[in-house]
């Protein structure tokens, strides 16, 4: 028979093992509930535990700050019977995640002992909140550094525009991982140093998802969309960020049909769209004036519960406005809970686009009542509205207010609006004087506005000046030649007309045909004047003849009404 004392010992061991297993299971449950956002349930599990260990306390401490209850985390931290280093690291991370880096440092300074995770948490906290000098000091003080420490500091230098220091530290790193390379490549891209990003990317031993996504963004910023797509296609396991980078690249570079097609591919690939996806799709819909597709995207935003996200609402306002549905733009704007500067700028710009000057003024006044100061974009929308309705006096008033009251520096676009307004009103000499204040980049549009006005107001001398300046900027501008030719023709200067046409032939300049498009049956139909390339052209012409005949017959029918 087994010894009685041995049986008792075995029973105690079994009970202890069972108890330890139950504690571990409950600790895991607390952590899972906390991460899922169910703090109340996590707290219930903790409170009902018959036994707790330090892991239990750390789990509930973390659950509180994960759910934005930092004060609760602090109370729990003070109540822990025996803290370990993970308790300290958790409260430090909690302070950082909840926007209190200084409080985090107080805990850090009070720690009886620290490990490398403690140092890295504090370093990342300082960098995250822009305490760059403190981060540099802390990095120097670290007794030991690992790849996380170096990578965080490289990223900090890049964000702080200290490119040279970032590269020097990157080159000194004893060991690099995939994230280190990706951070350096991304930093170059974000600081508009694409050539350096490309060179470093080519040196990478293994091209990971983060680096490839950064290169997609870089290629798109440089307008090299085809190369971006090649890089995108090389990625084996694409995530939402890489899909969004390519989508945004297409939309921002005017490849709007490709953007919408890619969105469909993304959905078919089983990748859940987020707010960035939908904003890019809405940008594409705006550019193509695809109202139906825009409504579908709006419905998807509602379905995925992203429709209350303010930047997405701003994109919806723009989309509906550009598609001609101003009522929908207003409804979206009214639904925004916290309207900031960007939202007001968006609705003011939408009203300006539709020539609704009264609503532009009303929105601007509401913005001021809410104590939101306008910026350069606000005044650009105001000037555009003035241009649309021909408010010359008001445009000069807004321009003066921008400088005198709000201390904003007018950009080329603002001067361009003033030039356009003055040109349309016939004040051509005054408009010409404003062009001298415009940068070369925006000069083209300003001279174009003046040239168009010269035709309207039959001013040959200024028309020649505007055309010559346009052709200096772009010698292949067919529009400048054609407009100048029309000015000469209106003035009866046929010799000058022939000279312009001869010059166009000599330089190989051809008038590019304009095109239009329609959204029919959820498809976009493109066409130009005299276009006969459509596969159903015979049926189109037949239907056109039928409609024309019907119109003629309707005109000739006696409606049988007599007026007394």
Image (tube, rainbow, N blue to C red):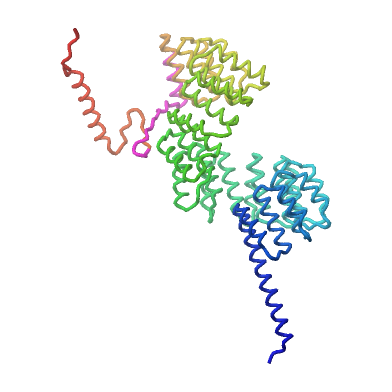
Q: Which span is picked out in magenta?
A: 496-523
Task: Give the side of residue 487 with respect to residue 245, left or right.
Answer: left
Q: Is residue 353 above or below residue 196?
A: above
Q: Is residue 4 above or below residue 547?
A: below
When the figure is inspected, residue 310 is found, relative to residue 411, above or below; the finding is: below
- State which quadrant residue 530 falls in: top left
Residue 120, percent from left and from top: 75, 53
Q: Judge by depth and name the residue closer to the eye, 512 or 371.
A: 371
Q: Left or right: 560 with respect to 258?
A: left
For residue 146, what is the image quadrant?
bottom right
**Residue drawn 51% across the image and 34% down it:** 335
Look at 46% across and 16% down and name the residue there: 484
The quadrant in which the C terminus is found is: top left
Residue 337 in magenta stretch: no
**x and y percentages locating residue 391 in the rendered image:** 52, 14
Residue 518 magenta? yes
- Residue 342, position as x, y percentages in the image: 58, 31
Q: 284 and 446: which one is in front?
A: 284
């Amino acid at each position: 028979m087994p010894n009685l004392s041995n049986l008792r010992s075995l029973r105690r061991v079994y009970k202890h093992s069972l108890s330890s297993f139950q504690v571990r299971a409950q600790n895991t449950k607390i952590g899972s509930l906390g991460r899922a956002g169910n703090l109340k349930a996590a707290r219930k599990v903790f409170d009902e535990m018959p036994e707790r260990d330090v892991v239990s306390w750390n789990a509930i401490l973390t659950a509180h700050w994960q759910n934005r209850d930092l004060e609760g985390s602090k109370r729990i931290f003070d109540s822990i019977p025996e803290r370990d280093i993970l308790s300290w690291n958790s409260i430090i991370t909690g302070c950082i995640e909840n926007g209190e880096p200084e409080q985090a440092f107080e805990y850090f300074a009070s720690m009886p002992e620290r490990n490398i995770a403690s140092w890295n948490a504090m370093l990342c906290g300082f960098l995250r909140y822009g305490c760059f000098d403190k981060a540099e000091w802390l990095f120097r003080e670290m007794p030991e550094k690992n790849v996380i420490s170096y990578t965080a500091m490289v990223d900090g230098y890049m964000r702080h525009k200290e490119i040279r220091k970032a590269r020097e530290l990157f080159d000194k790193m004893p060991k690099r991982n995939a994230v280190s390379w990706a951070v350096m490549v991304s930093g170059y891209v974000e600081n508009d140093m694409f050539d350096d990003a490309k060179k470093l990317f080519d040196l990478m031993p293994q091209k990971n998802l983060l680096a490839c996504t950064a290169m997609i963004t870089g290629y798109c910023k440089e307008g090299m969309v085809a190369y971006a797509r090649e890089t995108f296609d090389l990625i084996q396991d694409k995530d939402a960020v890489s899909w969004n980078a390519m989508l945004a690249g297409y939309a921002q570079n005017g490849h709007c049909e490709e953007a919408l097609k890619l969105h469909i591919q993304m959905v078919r690939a089983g990748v859940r769209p987020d707010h960035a996806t939908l904003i890019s799709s809405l940008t594409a819909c705006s550019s193509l004036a695809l109202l139906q597709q825009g409504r579908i995207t709006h419905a998807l935003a509602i379905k995925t519960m992203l429709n209350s996200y303010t930047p997405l609402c701003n994109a919806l306002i723009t989309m509906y406005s550009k598609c001609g549905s101003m009522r929908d733009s207003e409804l979206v704007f009214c639904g925004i809970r916290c309207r900031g500067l960007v939202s007001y700028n968006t609705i003011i710009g939408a009203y300006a686009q539709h020539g609704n000057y009264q609503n532009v003024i009303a929105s601007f006044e509401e913005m001021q009542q809410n104590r939101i100061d306008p910026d350069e974009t606000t005044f650009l929308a105001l000037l555009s509205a003035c241009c649309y309705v021909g408010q010359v006096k008001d445009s000069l008033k807004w321009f003066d207010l921008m400088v005198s009251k709000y201390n904003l520096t007018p950009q080329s676009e603002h001067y361009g609006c003033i030039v356009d307004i003055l040109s349309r009103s016939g004040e051509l000499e005054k408009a010409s004087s404003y062009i001298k204040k415009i940068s070369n980049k925006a000069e083209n549009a300003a001279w174009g506005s003046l040239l168009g006005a010269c035709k309207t107001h039959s001013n040959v001398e200024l028309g020649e000046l505007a055309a010559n300046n346009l052709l200096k900027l772009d010698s292949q501008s067919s529009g400048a030649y054609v407009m100048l030719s029309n000015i000469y023709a209106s003035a009866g200067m046929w010799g000058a007309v022939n000279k312009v046409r001869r010059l166009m032939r000599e330089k190989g300049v051809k008038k590019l045909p304009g095109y239009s498009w329609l959204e029919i049956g959820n498809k976009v139909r493109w066409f130009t004047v005299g276009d006969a390339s459509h596969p159903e052209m015979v049926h189109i012409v037949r239907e056109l003849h039928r409609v024309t005949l019907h119109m003629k017959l309707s005109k000739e029918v006696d409606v049988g009404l007599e007026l007394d």
